[in-house]
């Protein structure tokens, strides 16, 4: 399990994100820059123990209405080859030293562990506590077999990057047509809880704090199989 260090970052994660977010096509706030507050999230473990993996939810109050964003991030002790386009920024960790923070959609370690979470092979971990599963995170998977390993390969190379951003999210497409949709702009689900799209064969949902302090839930990620895939129930 990853160890959460109680220490300082200079600059902080929110400071890095404040500078980076306005460059994203799905950013809806003030062009002059967001006003961010941490609203929730969870972590995943890197099996090799080298890469920090965090799915952070932040709320921006700079626009007409508050907007919450899902920000998958990885933290590395050295630059990730071929991922200069995905660099959020660099920071100094009080224990670990220099850290390179990346948009995790372009980091193969995060993508692989996210697929493992969707398929139930790993557990989501609490964002701020070591060795503590996050029970607020739910997932499902109902397709035949595993998501192809090749799905993660294109995320590392700028020239062949299959990550596509649009007005509300990022979509990763595998060579067999499987796609992974990350909902960057989060929408609170109705009282019944988040419902994945009917065509989705897998999903991840979670909770965060709304602007008024109440806990809300919504869809974070959805997996769409290739057209010929015939899903079967496998929760």
Image (spheres, grey):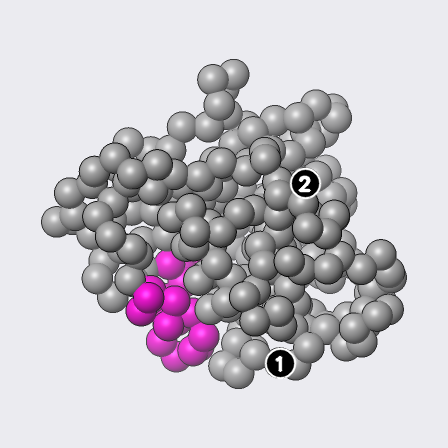
Which residues lie in the magenta part? 149-172
Number of numbered tags placed on the structure image: 2
Which residue lies at the image location 56% right of the left edge and 46% below the top edge?
124
Q: Tags 2 and 1 in contact by the CB under 8 Å rule?
A: no
The circle on residue 108 is none
Residue with the mark numbered 1: 79
Q: Is residue 114 toward the left or the right of residue 16 in the image?
A: left
Which residue is more in the foreground, 174 or 48? Answer: 48
Q: Position of residue 141 (x, y in %)?
A: 34, 42
Which residue lies at the image location 54% right of the left edge and 66% below the top edge?
47
Name the secondary structure under disc 1. Answer: loop
- Mark 1, Cα crowd under 10 Å, few <14 / some 14-19 / many 20+, is some
Q: Residue furthest top?
A: 191
Residue 139: image quadrant is: top left
The quadrant of the image that shows the N terminus is bottom right
Residue with the mark numbered 2: 40
Q: Position of residue 82 (x, y in %)?
A: 50, 81
Which residue lies at the image location 36% right of the left edge and 76% below the top edge?
160
Q: Is residue 189 toward the left or the right of residue 65 in the image?
A: left
Q: Is residue 77 toward the left or the right of residue 229 in the image?
A: right
Which residue is more in the foreground, 33 or 113? Answer: 113
Which residue lies at the image location 33% right of the left edge and 66% below the top edge?
149
Tell me the CA gap for discs 2 and 1. Answer: 27 Å
Which residue is more in the foreground, 52 or 199? Answer: 52
Q: Position of residue 67 (x, y in %)?
A: 63, 37
Viewer can see residue 151: yes
| First reached walking from the N terminus: tag 2 or tag 1 | 2
């Amino acid at each position: 399990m990853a160890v959460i260090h109680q220490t300082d970052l200079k600059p902080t994660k929110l400071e890095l994100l404040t500078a980076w977010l306005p460059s994203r096509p799905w950013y809806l706030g003030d062009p002059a820059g967001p006003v961010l507050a941490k609203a929730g999230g969870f972590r995943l473990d890197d099996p090799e123990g080298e890469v920090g993996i965090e799915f952070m939810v932040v709320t921006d109050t700079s626009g007409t209405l508050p907007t919450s964003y899902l920000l998958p991030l990885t933290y590395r002790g050295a630059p990730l080859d071929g991922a200069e386009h995905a660099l959020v920024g660099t920071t100094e960790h009080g224990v670990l030293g220099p850290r390179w923070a990346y948009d995790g959609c372009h980091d193969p370690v995060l993508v692989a562990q996210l697929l493992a979470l969707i398929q139930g092979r790993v557990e989501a971990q609490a964002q701020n506590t070591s060795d503590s599963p996050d029970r607020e995170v739910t997932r499902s998977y109902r397709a035949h077999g595993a998501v192809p390993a090749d799905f993660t390969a294109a995320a590392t190379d700028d020239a062949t990057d299959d990550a596509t951003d649009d007005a509300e999210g990022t979509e990763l497409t595998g060579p067999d047509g499987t796609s992974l949709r990350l909902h960057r702009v989060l929408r609170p689900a109705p009282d019944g809880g988040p419902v994945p799209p009917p065509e989705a064969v897998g999903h991840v949902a979670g909770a965060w704090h709304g602007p008024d302090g109440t806990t809300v839930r919504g869809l974070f990620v959805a997996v769409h199989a290739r057209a010929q895939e015939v899903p079967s129930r496998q929760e």
